[in-house]
Image (cartoon, grey):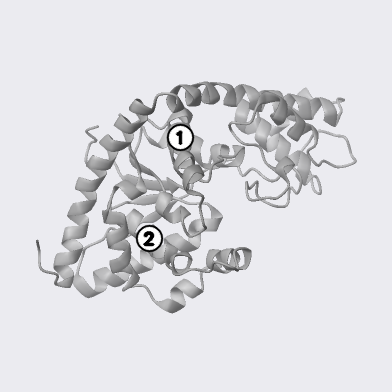
């Protein structure tokens, strides 16, 4: 687990929602796996973030374990990276409170995600949902993260983390590393199979719009066969062909073939043949992940060993940052 100092630190976390989609995998997780060779990677299952929405305790507990096992199955390697469960490292919640006091009300109220989630969960617009970005800033800043892989929906939160770090540094002197966004050039942007103008999302009410990494082969096949296309019946990238463009993007991501190579391969063939081929390619891609997931989820002792080991190291690293912050503010040391 010794990592050379010269490697830059990358931090990223994923919520234990119970389902990781093909979009999550191709757009982010597969890149996380590649980053492990070139960076000092710190990954977390963000269970503290998840409770801004009401959770059923038994299902929540299983979802956290499933998320941990599934990320290991996708290729997160605890010999190369730190990979822990967020709530096991107490410094995250502690620094989040401190950072709340250095985050402006106006900044939080401008967060797009807060507005969206407030509309979606109008019966539970809690303070945690509002202050969520301060916890995210704590997650990142505790580890002196140089970079954070972000999608379009998280850019605003990272910008706020940078503002908080700069504000604190401006008051107390150099304390936090100001993180930069890590923009991957290889992540596929996977869209909904039923409305390809929208990103694939497990929160979509239409279950045919998204594919889960753990979906059974026949389910994957059915979902792709029902995918929205167009009336042209020509497999090629083009204007007004959002559905086919999306399927070509997925095929390209899982096979490594270019869009042009795919167009040549399916010249003269119908959309039915193409949808079946995309589904088969996806099934092949997720098959080894599903097999590894079954191994991990049925070996609880191994999972416990891995997340405890990482949490212990994460706590030591993050405690140093927290101690420095508390000292700068003027708190009395224990």
Residue 204, image x, y percentages = 68, 50
Res 141 → quadrant: bottom left
Report the residue at 62% width, 68% height from top. 119
Residue 218, image x, y percentages = 72, 25
User: On the picture, is 186 further left or further right than 316?
Assistant: right
Res 80 → quadrant: top left
User: On the picture, is 176 further left or further right than 56?
Assistant: left
Q: Which residue is mark 2?
A: 135
Rendered-image quadrant of the C terminus: bottom left
Sequence-first disc among 2 and 1: 1
Residue 108, image x, y percentages = 46, 72
Report the residue at 48% width, 30% height from top. 74
Q: Nearer the viewer, residue 204 or 1?
A: 204
* Count of numbered circles in the view: 2
Q: Secondary structure at mark 1?
A: helix
Residue 6: tell me if it is visible: no
Residue at the farthest right position: 231
Whether the residues at callouts 2 and 1 have beta carbons within 8 Å, the answer is no
Report the residue at 49% width, 26% height from top. 293
> For the residue carrying disc 2, how many other residues have a C-alpha within 10 Å: few (<14), some (14-19), or many (20+)?
many
Rendered-image quadrant of the N terminus: top left
Residue 95, image x, y percentages = 28, 61
Mark 2 and mark 1: span between their CA atoms?
Answer: 22 Å
Q: Which mark is residue 239?
A: none
> For the residue carrying disc 1, how many other residues have a C-alpha within 10 Å: few (<14), some (14-19), or many (20+)?
many
Q: Secondary structure at mark 2?
A: helix
Looking at the picture, does residue 68 appear above or below residue 218?
Answer: below
Q: Which mark is residue 71?
A: 1
User: On the picture, is 255 further left or further right than 28?
Assistant: right
Residue 105: tell me if it is visible: yes
């Amino acid at each position: 687990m010794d990592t050379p100092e010269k490697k830059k630190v990358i931090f990223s976390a994923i919520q234990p929602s119970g389902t990781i989609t093909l979009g999550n995998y191709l757009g982010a997780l597969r890149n996380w796996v590649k980053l492990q060779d070139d960076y000092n990677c710190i990954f977390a299952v963000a269970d503290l973030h998840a409770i801004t929405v009401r959770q059923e305790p038994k299902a929540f507990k299983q979802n956290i374990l499933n998320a941990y096992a599934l990320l290991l199955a996708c290729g997160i390697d605890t010999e190369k990276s730190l990979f822990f469960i967020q709530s096991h490292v107490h410094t995250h919640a502690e620094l989040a409170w401190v950072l709340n006091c250095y985050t402006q009300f106006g900044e939080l109220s401008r967060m797009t995600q807060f507005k969206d989630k407030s509309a979606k969960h109008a019966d539970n617009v809690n303070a945690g949902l509002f202050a969520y970005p301060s916890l995210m800033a704590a997650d990142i800043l505790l580890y002196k993260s140089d970079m954070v892989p972000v999608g379009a929906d998280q850019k605003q939160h990272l910008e706020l983390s940078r503002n908080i770090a700069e504000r604190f540094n401006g008051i107390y002197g150099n304390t936090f590393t100001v993180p930069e966004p890590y923009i991957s050039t290889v992540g596929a942007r996977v869209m909904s199979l039923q409305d390809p103008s929208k990103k694939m999302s497990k929160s979509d009410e239409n279950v045919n719009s998204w594919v889960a990494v753990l979906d059974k082969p026949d389910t994957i096949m059915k979902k792709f066969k029902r995918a929205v296309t167009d009336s042209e019946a020509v497999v090629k990238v083009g204007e007004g062909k959002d559905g086919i463009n999306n399927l070509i993007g997925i095929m390209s991501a899982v096979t490594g073939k270019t869009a042009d190579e795919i167009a040549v391969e399916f010249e003269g063939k119908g959309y039915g043949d193409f949808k079946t081929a995309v589904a088969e390619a996806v099934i092949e891609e997720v098959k080894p992940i599903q097999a590894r997931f079954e191994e991990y989820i049925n070996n609880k002792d191994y999972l416990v060993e891995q997340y405890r080991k990482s949490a212990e190291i994460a706590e030591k690293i993050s405690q140093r940052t927290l101690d420095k912050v508390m000292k700068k503010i003027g708190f009395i040391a224990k």
